[in-house]
Amino acid sequence: MIRFEDVSVTYDGAAEPTVQGVDFEVPEGELVLLVGPSGVGKSTVLGAVSGLVPHFTGGTLRGRVTVAGRDTRTHKPRELADVVGTVGQDPLSHFVTDTVEDELAYGMESLGLPPAVMRRRVEETLDLLGLAPLRDRSLATLSGGQQQRVAIGSVLTPHPEVLVLDEPTSALDPAAAEEVLAVLQRLVHDLGTTVLMAEHRLERVIQYADQVALLPAPGARLRMGTPAEMMAESPVYPPVVDLGRLAGWDPLPLTVRDARRRAGDLRDQLAGRIPKDNAPAAADGGPAPQGPPAPDHETETGGAGGNPGTPRRRRAFRTRPTPPATVHIADVTALSVRRAHVHALRHIDLTVRPGETIALMGRNGAGKSTLLNTLVGLVAPSTGTVQVGGAPPHRTPPRDLVRRVGLVPQEPRDLLYADTVAAECRAADKDAAAAPGTCRALVTDLLPGVSDDTHPRDLSEGQRLALALAVVLTARPPLLLLDEPTRGLDYAAKARLVGLLTDLAAAGHAIMLATHDVELAAELAHRVILLAEGEVIADGPAAEVITSSPSFAPQVSKILAPQRWLTVAQVRKALS
Amino acid sequence: MRDHAGPSPHGHGTGASSDARLRGIGARPGSGADEPSQPDPDQPHGPIPDQPPRPVVADQASRPAIADQPPRPAPHRTPRPDPDQPSRPVAANQPSRPVPNRTPRPVALHPGAWWLWALSLGVAATRTGNPLLLALLVAVSAYVVATCRRPSPWSRSYAAFLKLALAVLLVRLLFAVTLGSPIPGTHVLVTLPELPLPDWAQGIRLGGRVTAESLVFALYDGLKLAALLICVGAANTLANPHRLLKSLPGALYELGVAVVVALTFAPHLIADVQRLRAARRLRGRPDTGLRGLLQVGLPVLEGALERSVALAAAMDARGYGRTAEVPPGVRRTTTALTLGGLLGVCAGTYGLLTAEGGTYGLPVLLAGLTAALAGLRLGGRRTPRTRYRPDRWTARSLLVAGSGAAVAAAMSVAGVTDPAALNPGVVPLVAPTLPLWPAAAVLLGLLPAFLAPAPKEPSP
C-alpha cells in the first residue's frame, strides 16, 4: 500500500540527507510503527507518504514513494487526500473550520462526497470517537484530548486507505489514548486501513503494531521486522521490553500479558525484597522531612531514577543556598477556581513540603494546569487561599514571585524571547537579579555542548525544555512546577530529565509536575495526586496511588503485581 | 506512456517548481521504463496515476462505512462522471437513502436571513432622523438579539458594537460643540472661547456659541449612525460570519476559506498575546504595560507564521484546492461569461450614472450581472467539492428576512408620505412625536424573536 524505494530526503540548505536509503513496504491493512530516537527523520518519512515532503516542505526527494499505486512525485498532497489521511503533532494547527461538526465534514467536502454520505459518516465518526456531545462546540474551547480526537476524526471521515499519524497520543491522558488506539485498531481490523504511525510512548502503542520500522540513528538505514525482533535491538524501548531484557526473556514480551506469563520466576526471585521507594522520607505519606534538607547532597544517589547525573551538575546545585525555612513551601486551602461558569477547581486542600516531588495526574481537562497556574499566580482563586512561600502568588509582584515559585509551561518556548542562548541567559540573570553567569552555568550543566549563539528555536524539544528549566532555576525557586514536561521527549531525553529532577529534589526543591506519563510519575514522584473534574480524588504515596488504578499503573507494576515494583530501575537495583 | 517526471496532470503554480526539483539528478534512472504498466482505466482498484481525482471520489464513496456495513463491490467507475450527478454511484451503495440532510440544523436560520434582517433595519434607520423611532429600532434589534443569540464566541460582539455606537454618538456631539454647526439657533446654552483662525481656514470655527438646536441636530444625526452600527452588530451577533461565507457560490469557495482562515487567525493571535504576556510573569517581568506587549510581538509573529505554514500543509493534505477536469469548452465559456459580465456591469453602471446613458444603463447592467453570475456558476464546476448540511432558505428564514425588508420598505414609504414626522425639525426646536404607523411598522422587526428564539438550555 505504501512503498518507499531507496528514498532519501535532503532539505534545502542541509549538507546531509535527513533520511537516506529508506526502502520498505507497508502491506495493505497493517499497522506499522515507526520507531527511533528524536531527530532521526521520522516526521520526514511520514511527510513523504502524504506528499507534503517535498511538495510542501521543499527539499529534494530521491527515489520513489508510491501510495496506493500513486507516485507522490506526480501527485500533490491534495491529489492524495482521498487515500492518505494525515494527523500531525499539534491538532490546533490542523483545524480549518471552527466547530467540531464542520471540521469532521471538511475533508469530505473537499473531495466532493455527496451530502447524504457526508452526513452519515459524520454521525458515525461522532459516535466512534465519543464526540457526539461536543458536536456544536467551538474547537477552541475543547481540551487537548478532545482536540486530538477531532483531528483524528476529521481525517477518518473521508475513509482514507492509509492513515499517517505523528505522535497521536502524546498529548492524551492514558484513558483517552487507549480510546484513540482502540479506534485505530478497529479501523485496521475491520476496514483494512493501513496505518503508519510514529509515537514516542511505545508502552502505549507497541502492542498494536503488526510490524516495526526502526530508524536507529540519524542517517542510519531503516530496518523493518516484527515488533519483538526490532525491540531487541532498538535504542528506544518501553519498560516492558526493558524488563524483558533485564530478565533475559526471549522472544521479548511486548504486552503486559505476555510479560506476566513469564514473570513467575522473576516474581519468586523478588519475593523477599522490598522496593526502595522513590521518596527518601515520604514513603509512608506521613510527616514532612525535618526542615529543609541540607544543601550538601554530594554523596546521595538521586533516588531510584537510575540516572545519577554527572558530578559537575551536582556541584552546581550544591552551591545553592538553603531554601527559606518554612516547613510548607506552598499551602492551598479550600481553593476553588471558576472560569466562565466552569468549575475548573473545587475545594482543593494541599500542602507542599520541601524536597517532595508531586505528580498531578488526571484526565485532560481535569484541572491540572489550572492548579499549577494558580500556584504561580496566573490564575486568581475564586474562593479559598493560596500561599506560596508565605504570600498569595497572584498578588505578589512578578519580580519577587520568581524567587518563590517557577513554572515551566507546557510549551517551553513561551518562556524564551531572545534569539540566542546567551542573550536568553543574560536576560534571565537580570530578571532574577542573580549574579551574571548564573543562568549560563546552569545551561552548561543541563545542556552540555550548546553554544552561546544557538537560536532557541533550533534546539530540539528536550533541549528547549532544559533551557527553559535553566531560565526558571536561575532565580532558585524552592517550588518548581512543570506542565507536561515529557511531551515529545524520547526515552533518552526523558531519562536525562528524570535524573535532573531527582537531583533537584534531593537538593531541597519541591517539584510538582502535571503529567499523563505514568512511567515518569512512577520514576519520579514521591506523592501522586489524582484530579477529576477539578476535585482531588486521591492523594498519597506514589506506590499506593498509581498501583491501585489500572489506567495509571506503570507497566512494571502491572507485570509484577501483587508485588509493588514501579520501575525497571527498582527491580534492577534489587536484583544486583 | 506518460513520463512520470513530467509535470503532474493538474500541475500549475508551485507544483511545477517542485516537480522540477524532483526531476533532479538523483531521480532513479529510467524512471519511465520500470514503472508499472498503465492500468486499465475501468479497473476500480488499480493504480490510477493518470486519472483526475474526480473518479477516485466515486470509488471512495463505495468503501464500507465504519459501522457494520458489509463491504460491497465497488461499482464500475465511469471515467468521467458528470459533475452534476455526484451521488449516482453512492445511491447504488445505499439501499434506503437517508434524508437527514434535508433537515437544516435545528433552529439555526440561514445566516443570510439574519444579515438581510439586520441590514434592512439599518436601512430603515437611515430613512429617519426621529430619535423616538431610532430608539425603537435599537430596542427592537436589542430585544431580538437578547432572545435569539446563542452562546458562541461571536455572540459577544454585540456589546462591543454598542460601545462603538456610543462612542460615535459622543464624538459627533463633541464635534458639534467644538467645531460649531451651520444650524442657525437662538437658544444659546453656553459660549465657549472662540479660537481666532487665519483667513485660509475660513468656514471652520473653533469654540464659540453652542446652541441647543445644533446640539439636538448633532444628537439626531449621531443617533442615526449609532443605530446603523448597532444593527450591523446585531447581524454579527446572530449569524456566524463563517457560515455566511460558506454560502458563497462554489467558484468563490477558495476565497471564502481564505477569509475564514483569516478570521480565525485573529482570535488565535489574541490568545497567543495573552499567553505570552502571562508567561512574562513567569520570567519575573511585569505582565502588564505597553513594553510587555511590544516584547512579545516577535515571538507572537513567529508563532503565527509557523501556525499558518502548518495550517496550509494540513489543508493541502486534506484536499484543499483540488480541481476537477472540465472540458475546454466549458472553461472558455466560463472565462468569456465572467469577463463579459464584468464589462457589462461596468458599462451599465457608467450608463446609469451619466445623464445620457439613461436608456441603455439598466438593461446592460442586468445583462452583465446575469452573465457574471452564470460565469460564477459554471466556474463552480471546476471545484468538485460539495457542502455539508448547507443552510437552507426555510420558510422561517424567509420570514425573518421579510420582516426586516418590510420595516425598511415601510420606513421608505413613510419618508415620502410623511417626511415631517420622520425628520423632526430642529429650527424651531420642537419635541419629536412618535408617528403611529411607522412605529407600528418598526415593531414588525420583532418577528424573529418569536420565530427563532434561542434554545432555553445553553449548550454545554
Image (cartoon, coloured by chain):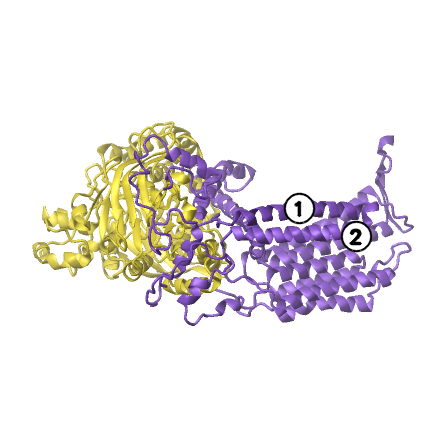
What is the x, y in percent for residue A447? 30, 34
Which quarter of the figure has residue A20? top left
**Along the viewing direction, whichever of A200 and B352 lies nearer the viewer:** B352
Of labels 2 and 1, the one closer to you: 1
* Of the image marks 2 and 1, the number of the one nearer the N terminus: 2
**Along the viewing direction, whichever of A445 and A399 lies nearer the viewer:** A445
What is the x, y in percent for residue B399? 66, 68
Kindly indicate whether the residue at mark 1 contacts the one at mark 2 (C-beta within 8 angstroms). Answer: no
In the image, the chain rendered in purple is B
Which element type, helix, strand or loop, lies under badge 2?
helix
Which element type, helix, strand or loop, lies under badge 1?
helix
| Residue at which label 2 appears | B221
What is the x, y in percent for residue A467? 35, 36
What is the x, y in percent for residue B223? 76, 55
Q: Residue at x 12, y 59 (%)?
A: A261
Task: Give the Cα distance between marks 2 and 1.
Answer: 42 Å
Return the mark for residue B340: 1
A175 relative to B228 in the view: left or right: left
Q: Which hue is chain A drawn in?
A: yellow
> Could you tell me the amino acid type at mark 1?
Gly
